[in-house]
Image (tube, rainbow, N blue to C red):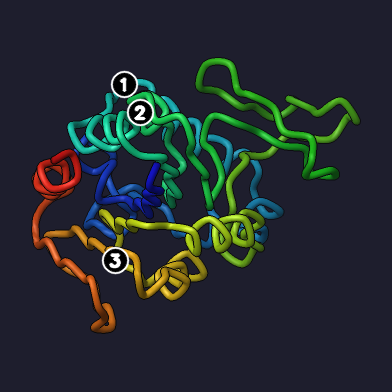
Amino acid sequence: MKKIVVLSGAGVSAESGIKTFRDNGGLWEGFDVMDVATPEGWAKNQALVLDFYNQRRKQSHEVMPNEAHKILAKLEDKYEVTIITQNVDNLHEKASSSNVIHLHGELFKSRSTIDENLVYEIEGWELKIGDNCELGSQLRPHIVWFGEMVPMMEIAYKIVQKADIFIVIGTSLVVYPAASLVDYVSEKAELYVIDPNLPHISPRSHLHLIEKSATAGMKEILNILMK
């Protein structure tokens, strides 16, 4: 069975109604990213950070996977599919994709502030001051903030190198280290890039540029790959 590896970004979730932080009035609306998505912001005002992610979590409960998510899940009928996502929402899982790697963390999980290996599912949408890990430390969002290491990158690099087909969808390829995954794709692999505003990517063999939305682009790929 051939291996498909997908790198998904905010453009996929945007079609479900989740705004991207690069949009005007987008995900970080009214907030300085340094206040809500950095270790320094957490040290300065934990309540603000918790509330910010609580609102994102509440919103995510109300949205559903779109056709692009569903098509990615359908590809598992014929291929071994791994989705490496920059998104922290759970829409790939909601669409029944069975193998999802979250590079930047998961919105519906929390973790200890003194032992990063202690990770917990969040019931509902609220994480509050006083919610502690089993060691008595305040829980924080299980999110990779700006300035923090991306612990899943080494695993992702190894997976990408084995891809027969690599699909980039809904990402500008400007956020590192995630954007560097493209450099690990084999020259023999088919590389599809889907975005209405195509990111810059170096010319190479087997490169297919699809200047469409996530859903429209995935419909086109589905027709190609399921023949």
> Marks 3 and 1, Cα distance to the nearest angstrom?
26 Å
Q: Quadrant of the C terminus?
A: top left
**Drawn side of residue 55 relative to residue 42, left or right:** left
86 shown above or below 161:
above
Secondary structure type for disc 2 = helix
Dots 1 and 2: beta carbons under 8 Å? yes
Tag on residue 172? Answer: 3
Residue sitting at x 25%, y 78%? 205
Quarter of image, res 226 = top left
Residue at (34, 58) in percent of width and height:
166
Q: Position of residue 209 (x, y in %)?
A: 15, 67
Where is mark 2, residue-wise?
Answer: 59
Q: Residue furthest bottom?
A: 203
Image-based side of 162 in relation to 119, left or right: left
Q: Residue 13 sits in which quadrant?
A: top left
Residue 109 percent coordinates (x, y)? 60, 31
- Within-10-Å neighbours for mark 3: few <14, some 14–19, many 20+: some
Q: Which residue is mark 1?
A: 62
Among the two numbered marks 3 and 2 on one chain, the one whose residue lies closer to the N terminus: 2
The residue lying furthest to the right in this view is 135
Type of amino acid at the residue the image marks with label 3: Ser
Spatial CA distance of label 1 from label 2 is: 5 Å
- Residue occupying image coordinates x 35% and y 70%: 188
**12 or 98, nearer to the observer:** 98
| Observer-nearest of 36 and 135 | 135
